[in-house]
Image: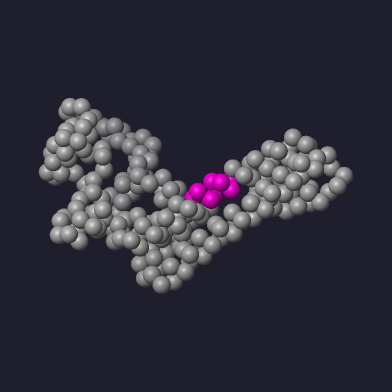
């Protein structure tokens, strides 16, 4: 909608709800919301969210689908392990171990796995293979996009950042012009310590964990690969 309004000659601004709520002093309705928005938009401390391009939204949609499939795959593997363990069939930890041992267990006619359970596990294993392929396809999309995007290649020069993280960063923040310095990006993403300072005595706690959890997770994993 913001892009549509901009094409009509308006200057559309997007801001987080948390900047509006403090200025709504009465009950929530359309009129009071509009008054609160008018108050919030005039404050110099209010920050606005840049309007995403169709390309950015498309990349983010691929990331969201991959995230969904990864979670579904993890849940499916845990379910398969639990069902097999009920029949005394234990699989070592790890996705590769599960992919290796399940076919062997299904082919073993001497174990105590009933026919109905064997059929259900076989269907689940087939679905797991489909999820693996879908996730691999999304990763191929990221790699292909990285080859033709100079901005993605520039971000990938940072140690620990690959095509997946680089595309997620650019799709989330665009050119980053909304940040005055790199620390502002860290604060926006929740990677800086939470402050509770008073009387000139700084007190720093754990990281705030504000912002996009998915993007923050990717950066944390990238940092681990660097320091490992």
Q: Quick one: 86 or 130, which is closer to the camera?
A: 130
Does the magenta run of residues contain 73?
yes
Total marks placed: 0
Q: Residue at x 45, y 52 (%)?
A: 64
- Bounds of the magenta span? 67-74
Residue farthest toward the right in the current orientation of the protein: 110
Inspect this view and state whether residue 58 appears.
yes
Residue toward you, 50 or 32: 32
Residue located at (21% from left, 32% from top): 29
Residue 70 covered by magenta stretch: yes
Closer-to-camera residue (151/202): 151
Residue 30: image quadrant is top left
Q: Is residue 23 visible in this depiction of the protein?
A: no
Judged left or right of residue 187, residue 215 is right
State left or right for residue 194 relative to residue 84: left
Q: Nearer the viewer, residue 100 or 130?
A: 130
Q: Quadrant of residue 5?
A: bottom left
Q: Position of residue 196 (x, y in %)?
A: 29, 32
User: How far across and down, in percent of the image, does residue 95 sit?
Assistant: 65, 50
Residue 8 falls in which quadrant of the image?
Answer: bottom left
Q: Position of residue 83 (x, y in %)?
A: 71, 38
**51 shown above or below 33:** below
Please state the horizontal and vertical placement of residue 99, each as a whole percent of the image.
69, 52
In the picture, measured across the screen, residue 9 lies left or right of residue 174, that is left
Magenta stretch, main secondary structure class = helix
Q: Residue furthest top?
A: 26
Q: How is the image coloured?
A: one colour
Q: At x 44% / y 71%, what residue is drawn? A: 147
Image point (42%, 55%), residue name: 61
């Amino acid at each position: 909608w913001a892009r549509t309004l901009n094409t009509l000659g308006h200057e559309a601004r997007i801001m987080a709800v948390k900047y509006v709520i403090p200025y709504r002093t009465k009950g929530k309705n359309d009129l009071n919301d509009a008054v609160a928005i008018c108050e919030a938009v005039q404050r110099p401390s209010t920050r606005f969210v840049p309007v995403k391009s169709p390309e950015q939204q498309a990349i983010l949609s691929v990331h969201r689908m991959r995230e969904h499939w990864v979670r579904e795959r993890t849940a499916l593997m845990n379910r398969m392990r639990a069902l097999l363990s009920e029949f005394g069939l234990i699989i070592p930890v790890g996705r590769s171990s599960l992919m290796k041992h399940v076919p062997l267990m299904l082919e073993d006619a001497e174990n105590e796995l009933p026919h109905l359970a064997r059929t259900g596990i076989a269907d689940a294993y087939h679905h797991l293979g489909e999820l693996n392929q879908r996730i691999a396809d999304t990763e191929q999309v990221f790699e292909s996009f990285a080859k033709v995007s100079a901005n993605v290649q520039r971000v990938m020069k940072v140690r620990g950042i690959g095509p997946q993280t680089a595309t997620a960063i650019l799709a989330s923040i665009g050119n980053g012009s909304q940040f005055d310095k790199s620390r502002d990006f860290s604060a926006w993403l929740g990677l800086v310590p939470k402050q509770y300072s008073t009387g000139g005595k700084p007190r720093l706690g754990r990281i705030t964990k504000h912002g996009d959890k998915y993007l923050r997770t990717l950066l944390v994993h990238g940092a681990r690969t660097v320091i490992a």
